[in-house]
Amino acid sequence: MTMKLVKYEAARSALKAAKKIDEVKSIHDKAVAIAAYAKQAKDSDLVTWALEIRVRAERRAGELLKEMPKAGGGKGQLQ
């Protein structure tokens, strides 16, 4: 149980430190995989923690996307 908590805290710290979308995506994908494994293993605590990390990753991705400049689009490109 303690090892799970350590990894959970490590994932939270990694999300806070993530500066690129691909870093966040990697953490998100790992959390999804861990949740699937935990369901098979019938470990409800691990499922809950993995889903929490997934949600945190989705929120962090949204924050990073907000910070990115918007594309200028194709103004004047129609013919």
Image (tube, rainbow, N blue to C red):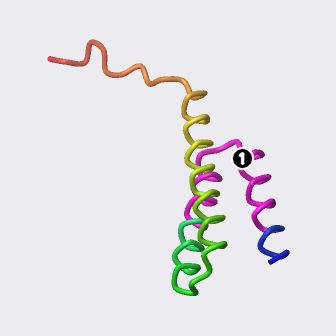
Whether residue 71 sits left or right of residue 68 in the image: it is left
Query: Percent from the top left, x then y, of residue 45?
Result: 66, 72
Using the rendered view, name the quadrant where residue 28 is placed. Answer: bottom right
Residue range highlighted in magenta: 7-30
- Locate the N terminus by quadrant: bottom right
Q: Residue 73 lies in magenta, yes or no? A: no
Question: What residue is disc 1 on?
Answer: 18
Task: Work out which residue is located at the far left of the displayed protein and give it.
Answer: 79
What's the residue at 62%, 80% (across, down)? Answer: 43
Query: Percent from the top left, x then y, of residue 29?
Result: 55, 64
- Locate the C terminus by quadrant: top left
Whether residue 46 sits left or right of residue 5 in the image: it is left
Using the rendered view, name the quadrant where residue 35 is placed. Answer: bottom right
Task: Work out which residue is located at the far top of the displayed protein and give it.
Answer: 76
Q: Secondary structure at mark 1?
A: loop
Front one among 45 and 79: 45
What's the residue at 58%, 57% (across, down)? Answer: 54
| Chief SS of the magenta region | helix
What's the residue at 19%, 18% (across, down)? Answer: 78
